[in-house]
Image: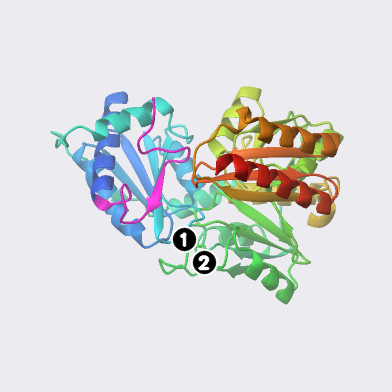
Amino acid sequence: MSRKYFGTDGIRGRVGESPITPDFMLKLGWAAGRVLVDRYDGPGLILIGKDTRISGYMFESALQAGLINAGVDVGLLGPMPTPGIAYLTRTFQAQAGIVISASHNSYFDNGIKFFSAEGTKLPDDIEHAIEEQLDQPMITAERLGKARRITDAAGRYIEFCKGTMPWGFKLSGMQIVVDCAHGATYHIAPSVFSELGAKVIPFACEPNGTNINRSCGSTNPEALKEKVQEVGADLGIAFDGDGDRLIFVDHKGEVVDGDELLYIIAAYQQQFGGGCPGVVGTLMSNFGFELGLKELGVPFARAKVGDRYVIETMRNNNWSLGGESSGHIVCGNVTTTGDGIISALQVLLAIDAMGKSLNSAKQGMTKMPQTMINVHRVKKVDLDSDPAVQSAVAATEKQLGERGRVLLRPSGTEPVVRVMVEGEDRAEVKALAQQLADEVEKALN
């Protein structure tokens, strides 16, 4: 069944443009409430959390009103990282959790994500049922719901994060710059690391509703790199606006991305954690990451881009570790979804146990030069059946041999096809990518 509103990661768009409008959110709250009331015994409870963008106030009120009209009780969490909402949904035994966030996007965007009672993405059949309910007239329930604010939500989640570490684990003597992107982790992440003993220098922790992700956070690490070197910190950690992604910056100001962080966690698990059964990456994961895991003796599988597909592949393989080069990492042995703070702690645990610095812990993995070119698409073309494109792909793959790879991937959010080439020689990779992009351009336009 095709989806009208839900994408691979909820509903997202520009504030004020359909469907990211107050009237739609009112109807969405009612529709979700009606579906969940029918699915579960009793009125139940649904939690609502949000990041720090200014439109969150408006959508929180609209969703709350819709849920109450459907007869559902509401727990308001306030600003809270997306993975924190997943955790609290489980611990409150709520029927669902709703996240108001557009993740790493600018403040003028917003969106809605749902978590199931188990703290995982909402099943497809329930999303379809909600979309069908949206087409029905909104009827007031005989028994209206109630709303209450959960005042200790942040403290509960902080304790959970710290509790994922072994007893006695400390960060004493470590100086860390923590970049919260003026987002949902601003009042949580600094406390987690400082309460574990680190000297924390908070950075981008002053949200004003419109500065979320602006020149900061995991997608804009330049300011963090400068800050780490300026204060002489051991490392820096940057989260995105809703706290489900992260990157590290080492003491020299060099970025350590999601592939490298996954490698460090996998190496630790393989050496100290009883073995690492396997790791899930995506089509965009660096080829050097795959080769590094092979050297460790750790199986690797690629999923489509998107945490939904990463988690699905993890589940199918019965593996507990996976993620994306963007820094969205899922440590399934301790939580149910991508969690920036939890993942950061797992990396810190790894380098502590291995007695290495951040930089030395990733030395077994060598990232391969990668060039990606976005080719604008005017018309839809099946590139898999285009003879000229496939001939160019085959020639490129032959030239790269077993030490490189090629990927053509239509974007799910933009009218472009991403042409990516990886290999050992940077100049060769760049030239091959351009040749292939030129061939794709001819086919598309």
Identify the magenta region.
1-22
Q: Please indicate, yes or no, whether residue 336 appears anywhere in the rendered image.
A: no
Specify the label residue 106 is tagged with. 1
Q: Measured from the top left, where is residue 306 in percent x and y?
A: 56, 39
- Looking at marks 1 and 2 on the same chain, the residue that comes earlier in the sequence is marked by 1
Q: Which of the numbered marks, if any, corresponds to residue 214?
A: 2
Image quadrant in which the C terminus is located: top right
Image quarter of residue 383: top right
Is the Cβ of the residue at disc 1 closer than 8 Å to that at disc 2? yes
| Amino acid type assigned to the residue bearing label 2 in the image | Arg
- Image position, residue 99 (x, y; %): 41, 47
| Residue at the image position 73 percent from the left and 44 percent from the top | 421
Quarter of the N terminus within the rendering: top left
Front residue of 352/11: it is 11
What's the residue at 59%, 69% (across, down)?
203
Compare residues 169 and 40 and report the one nearer the observer.
40
Across and down, in percent, residue 338 comes to 57, 43
Question: For the stretch drawn in magenta, what is the main secondary structure?
Answer: loop
Q: Does residue 10 show up magenta in the picture?
A: yes
Placement of 189 over or under 396, stated as above or below: below
Left or right: 230 as drawn, with respect to 115? right
Left or right side of 83 for 260: right
Q: Which mark is residue 96?
A: none
Residue type highlighted by circle 1: Ser
Q: Nearer the viewer, residue 259 or 410?
A: 410
On the image, the x and y values in percent for residue 354 come to 83, 47
